[in-house]
Amino acid sequence: MTAGTRLMPFPARLKTELQIDSILLTIVLTLLLGGFVILASASISISDNAAGNPFFYIQRQLVAAAIGALAGGVCLFIPMRVWQNLGPLMLFAGMALLIVVLVPGIGYEVNGSTRWVRIGIMNLQVSEPARLCFLMYLAGYLVRRNKSLREEFVGFLRPMLVLTIACVLLLKEPDFGAAIVLLATVLTMLFVAGARIRDFVVFFSTAVVAMAALAITSPYRMKRLTGFLDPWSDPFDSGFQLTQSLIAIGRGEWFGVGLGDSVQKLFYLPEAHTDFVFAVFAEEFGLLGSLLLIALFLSLLWRIFKLGVRAADAERFFEAYMAIGLGTWLGLQAFINVGVNMGLLPTKGLTLPLISYGRSSLIVTMICIGLLLRIHHELAVDAKPVNRKRGRKKK
């Protein structure tokens, strides 16, 4: 490195060195900005009724987006090896969050679920950052213990024990949806890392039996299941949310009723700005708009998984596992949310990433995007000829 390079101002060096995945960033910004528009429309009546301000929820979402952009920007400048080294600390932080929320007087209860803790100006839904912490720990574990994972049952058992404890804590809140997403994401990461199929069969069979027993022995969960299977049999109680969602989607037809003209959001559709924002979108933009939104999410997943493949090809396995885990998490959550709105899945309290109102979800999602952009940056820098020559000289 020359003296001239050393004396170059920091912002100038940063500008020339930072490599941004413009396609990934464009998709994310399109979803985010479009989400602000549909959220403003979906929440205007609810906001006016709850706070006397028609833009109450969109203003709070904009603040969360600003916090998320700042946090994601910080992550963009932190090397991935730092996160890899912090794996055990991330595990401790994730467990601590799930335990603290269950402590009386600390956890904040809404609609019968204790999922939030009060931090400053907002309530933090602890399952969101906790899941990210677990994925960071697991990605590091898969790098350190890959041989054991591929050859020994104990290598598969260790992360499963951690996952089981985390899922039990989530179910205590209760947050069944978050537990399902975490379980599916972890299993996907283990499969990609080369875990043996027979280990999967043993754990998956046990998990299915446990989840089925939990659903059967919990009256309210059983009610949700029966309501999902035939919502029209009880359209004013267990099937109310789904029937109203289906009415909204049906009213949209091909091209929708127009932005702001949804009827179902006017106190007919519960949680129109959170869990069922897709139904409002479908009513206002129709089938074609809904297909476009789904295509954007599929494009986002394609870009993230492609990033994971590139990282694996470059033998940066921590980054590869992180990309696969984050992509699975975001994709599965979007799939469940849309599936619930369309009556394909039982009702779950999961937001539509970058679209639904949910400040914790939005902030953590933008942190995930910052991590993905960092992975792209490191791969792009490593791929430069000058860096490859330096790597060969070090060897």
Image (tube, helix red, strand yellow):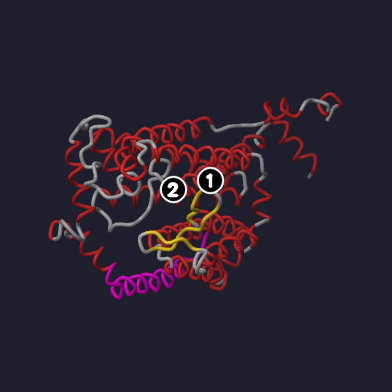
Q: Is residue 32 left or right of residue 140?
A: left
Q: Residue visible at 62% across and 35% down?
A: 380
Majority secondary structure of magenta residues: helix
Whether the magenta-drawn stretch holds residue 210 is answered as: yes
**Mark 2 touching mark 1, by CB under 8 A?**
yes
Q: Residue visible at 28% across and 73% down?
A: 216
x, y percentage for residue 381? 66, 35
Q: Quadrant of residue 57?
A: top left
Residue carrying label 2? 330
116 relative to 290, above or below: below
Q: Residue visible at 66% across and 39% down?
A: 77
Whether the magenta-drawn stretch holds residue 143 is answered as: no
Q: The residue under label 2 is which amino acid type? A: Leu
Q: The residue under label 1 is which amino acid type? A: Cys
Residue carrying label 1? 368
Disc 2 residue crowd, few under 14, some 14–19, many 20+, Cα 10 Å? many
* Quarter of the picture holding the N terminus: top right
336 relative to 149, above or below: above
Given the current orientation, which residue lies at the most extreme left position? 233
Label 2 vs 1, first from the N-terminus: 2
Q: Is residue 250 left or right of residue 273?
A: left
300 relative to 259, above or below: below
Given the current orientation, which residue lies at the most extreme right position? 3
x, y percentage for residue 151? 56, 68
Q: Which residues are magenta?
A: 194-220
